[in-house]
Image: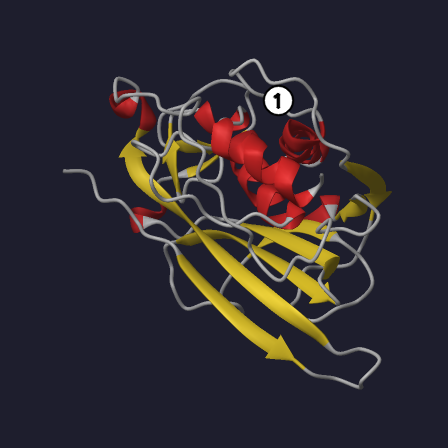
Amino acid sequence: MARALLVACLIAALAATPAQAARLEVVLEYGSVADGAAHAAAADDSCRNREWHPTGFANGPAWAARGYTYFANLSRMPHGDRDRRQITKGKHTWDNTRNGCGYKDITNFRSRYGGRTKATVHSRRDGLNVVDFGSLARFTRDRFAIAVTFTWWENGHLVETDSRFEQPPSTPAGTLSWSVSGKPEVNRWDLWSMAAHESGHAAGLGHATTSTDNWLTMSPLLYTNSVRWRTLGRGDVVGLRALFP
């Protein structure tokens, strides 16, 4: 049986000066070494399963402005702007409510690409929403984690988010990597799919764990050789509608 790697979450409270005090939620994402093509025959419940969970402390729209602007550190991306474009597609999955279930664009939520930055992802607020690639060692000792998203909350609203994709992935024997080709690839995780999942966290959504064989975008495992998480399922759409009514 292919080994599936489970998800761990860590919630911590940050206290700086009273004006800077915020609650930080850290979500580590794990890949699976299983080949997604072998799982494609499993029952697709993505348009029936309405499971969703908030990831933090939402009170009203998760982002008070119903969206955010993010910046990309292209110098840390192995394929440069090709990686950034895949990440932007992942974010637009939510902006456009991209789904195969027939749902229209039912949300008032937008992420916006603000351009390049030299800033990097770290576990403290710096006023920028940053996406980059790099080691996760400073954030976790678990070598099976392949992405992490930080969200900072104040007064029931998100005020900042950062996401990092591990490069190179520290998987067994170092044989797996990211795909930016636009199609399923053996031994590669689809970056668009992972970016869609991490962008769900950035919008305020947590993991959905009951989907048959992880069909929902917010399901906790990402398979290689699959692009299924590019497309939202029922629970993903319902959750986004609830966070941004």
Residue at 70% from the left image edge and 22% from the top image edge: 105
- The residue drawn where x is 37% and y is 54% is 144
Q: Are there few (<14), some (14-19), or many (20+) residues within 10 Å of tag 1?
A: some
**Residue 168 in view of the camera:** yes
Residue closest to the far bottom: 17
- Give the quarter of the figure containing the C terminus: top right
Q: Is residue 115 above or below residue 63?
A: above
Res. 190 in view: no
Quadrant position of the N terminus in the picture: top left
Q: Residue at x 54, y 40 (%)?
A: 197
**Does residue 214 appear left or right of residue 98 in this picture?**
left
| Quarter occupied by residue 22 | bottom right
| Residue found at x 43% / y 20% | 184
Is 88 displayed left or right of 174 in the figure?
A: right
Give the tally of numbered discs: 1
Residue 95: percent from left, percent from top = 71, 30
**Image location (x, y in percent) of residue 11:** 52, 69
Asked whether 58 or 11 is in front, the reply is: 58
Residue beneath disc 1 = 98
